[in-house]
């Protein structure tokens, strides 16, 4: 592991359940947690966005997650990430970059967002 990939996070994956009204939703109280080590999570280079609604200012801060070379990651767009005291949502699909010299994944990248 290089010095760049020394961080860890907890992947939170909630099962999809049907509520009493027949709606499908994630049950975060029954979520599975898995600690993942050897990644790099940094503030995103894109600027945070501010959104106002009902007299409340919401700040959305972006984070970038990347694995080291040769490391695949079991992370889905519907998962959450617990990192450094924050709960982050996966923003969009997780990018798996193919290895240019053989089969498999070269590395994985994901955008994360914290909503305050």
Image: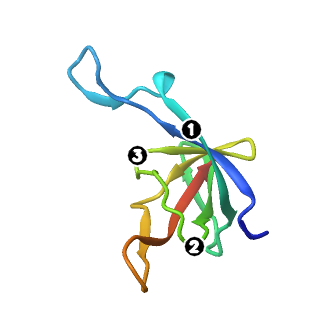
The one nearer the camera, 35 or 95, is: 35
Q: Residue furthest left?
A: 22
The answer to whether 90 is drawn above or below residue 67 in the figure is: above
Which tag, 1 or 2, sits closer to the chain's start?
1
Task: Please state if 48 lies on the left or on the right of 70 as rendered.
Answer: right
Residue depicted at x 49% and y 56%: 73
Q: Which residue is mark 3?
A: 78
- Label 3 or label 1, whichever lies nearer to me, is 1
Residue 21 pos. (x, y %): 23, 18
Q: Which residue is mark 1?
A: 34
Characterize the local packing of mark 2: few (<14), some (14-19) or many (20 or more) Cα atoms within 10 angstroms: some
Residue depicted at x 46% and y 51%: 75
Q: CA distance from mark 1 to mark 2?
A: 21 Å
Residue 80 pos. (x, y %): 52, 44
Q: CA distance from mark 3 to mark 1?
A: 15 Å
Q: Quadrant of residue 93?
A: bottom left
Note whether residue 116 is visible: no
The one nearer the camera, 51 or 25, is: 25
Q: Quadrant of residue 24?
A: top left
Say what secondary structure mark 1 lies in: strand
Is there CB contact under 8 Å for labels 2 and 3?
Answer: no
**Count of picture labels:** 3
- Label 2 or label 3, whichever lies nearer to me, is 2
Characterize the local packing of mark 3: few (<14), some (14-19) or many (20 or more) Cα atoms within 10 angstroms: some
Q: Residue furthest top?
A: 20
Which tag, 2 or 3, sits closer to the chain's start?
2
Q: CA distance from mark 2 to mark 3?
A: 24 Å
The answer to whether 67 is drawn above or below residue 86 in the figure is: below
Q: Which residue is mark 2?
A: 69
């Amino acid at each position: 592991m290089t010095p760049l990939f020394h961080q860890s996070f907890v992947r939170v994956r909630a099962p999809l359940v049907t509520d009493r009204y027949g709606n499908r939703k994630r049950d975060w109280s029954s979520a599975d947690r898995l600690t993942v080590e050897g990644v790099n999570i940094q503030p995103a280079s894109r600027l945070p966005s501010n959104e106002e609604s009902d007299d409340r200012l919401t700040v959305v801060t972006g984070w970038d997650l990347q694995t080291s070379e040769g490391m695949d990651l079991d992370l889905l767009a519907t998962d959450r990430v617990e990192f450094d005291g924050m709960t982050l949502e996966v923003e969009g699909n997780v990018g798996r970059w193919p290895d240019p010299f053989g089969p498999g994944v070269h590395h994985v990248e994901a955008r994360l967002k914290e909503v305050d």
